[in-house]
Image: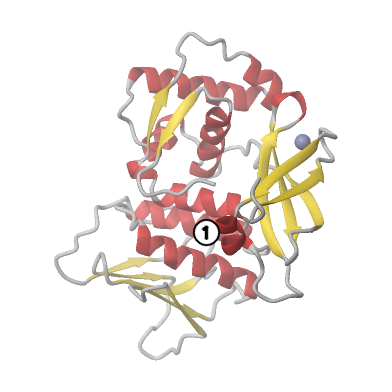
Amino acid sequence: MSSHEKQVVYLCDVCKTTQMILFTPKMKEEFLPKDLNGLALYSHSHMCANGMIGVNNLYIDHNLDVRSYNFLKLPKYVPKKKMVIPMPGKPVDDDNLKFIHITHINSKNDLNIILFNEMTGTEIQIGTFDKKNTSPQKIVKSEMEMVILKYYYSNTMYTSQIEKWLVSLTCFLEMIPPSKLGIIVEVFRYILEEKNKMPTKFEQMIMKTILASHEIFFTNNNTNMDTAFLTGLYGEAEGKTMQAIMELIDENPLMALHQYSQKLNEEIVYTIYCFLILEKHGLITINRPGIITY
Ligand SMILES: [Zn+2]
């Protein structure tokens, strides 16, 4: 360990083991709060009790001392909800500006948004409102201002939490524009579910993975491995889904992530969660072009 690196140590409450993270100067630059009294959120994953993956959200101060932390509950199995996708996924054409109207994400009037994407030459309106005679409440821009999101009044209040989600989303859209409209709908559904808290690194990774789900492919690392232990660790429904995923990878290694979600008839966030678990156990490799893992 060089003098520029620092070890951060904490005790995981679930497995009662001491966890160590080595903060390199680059990580400090990336994660540390810029103001002296601020706290930064860092999500740390490790092999936790009974071989399960545990994620702790650590709140770290300027000196890299852990002020507080909590154990992240990963999304558990959710019974399939009725999908509300008002139109089928269509490839985005970037020849000239296209206007696309998505009438609603969940129930009526949950979101009123205009999403302009210069890279794909599209303007998407979410919600039914008169955009000509209404002024946006807030405007969120991506880093290079290629993606501009106008937020209009709706049943979903604009808060600092939702702002954080939308800023992340515009920046991700600049990096990885989705090829299907259905994927945009999935991302907004996810944001609406999680909108009352700040997104963590883990949740940002789920969001990035949803956006890039058409270009993520998998490699099965060990076809002969007995995966029955997954059921014992994560539950029967989860084990079954993961087993099905392993079989599907064997049958068709070139299938993209969003196709798994359709084939398994599961929500994309839940499908991604199962993939991340399989990856952490070393059963599969996830090939993610343009996606930064942590
Ligand atoms: Zn643990």
Query: What's the coloring here?
Result: secondary structure
Residue 69 relative to residue 283: left or right: right
Q: How many labels does the image show?
A: 1
Give the quadrant of residue 177.
bottom left
Circle 1 SS class: loop
Between 284 and 250, which is closer to the camera in this rendering? 284
142 is higher (above) or lower (below) than 14: below
Residue at the extreme front: 3
Which residue is painted at 42% across and 72% down in the image? 142
82 is higher (above) or lower (below) than 25: above
Residue 243 relative to residue 72: left or right: left
> Label 1, on which residue?
106
Between 243 and 173, which is closer to the camera in this rendering? 173
Which residue is painted at 52% across and 85% down in the image? 137
Q: In which quarter of the image is the N terminus?
A: top right
x, y percent for residue 76: 66, 38
Please rate how many residues cluster around mark 1, counting C-alpha atoms within 10 Å: few if below 14, some from 14 to 19, many from 20: some
> Which image quarter has ligand 1?
top right
Q: Is mark 1 within 8 Å of ligand 1?
A: no
Between 21 and 293, which is closer to the camera in this rendering? 21
x, y percent for residue 149: 42, 75
Give the quadrant of residue 96.
bottom left
Between 113 and 288, which is closer to the camera in this rendering? 288
x, y percent for residue 62: 73, 67
x, y percent for residue 152: 49, 80
Which residue is painted at 27% across and 72% down in the image? 118
Residue at the extreme left: 95
Q: Which amino acid does label 1 sit on?
A: Asn
107 is higher (above) or lower (below) than 155: above
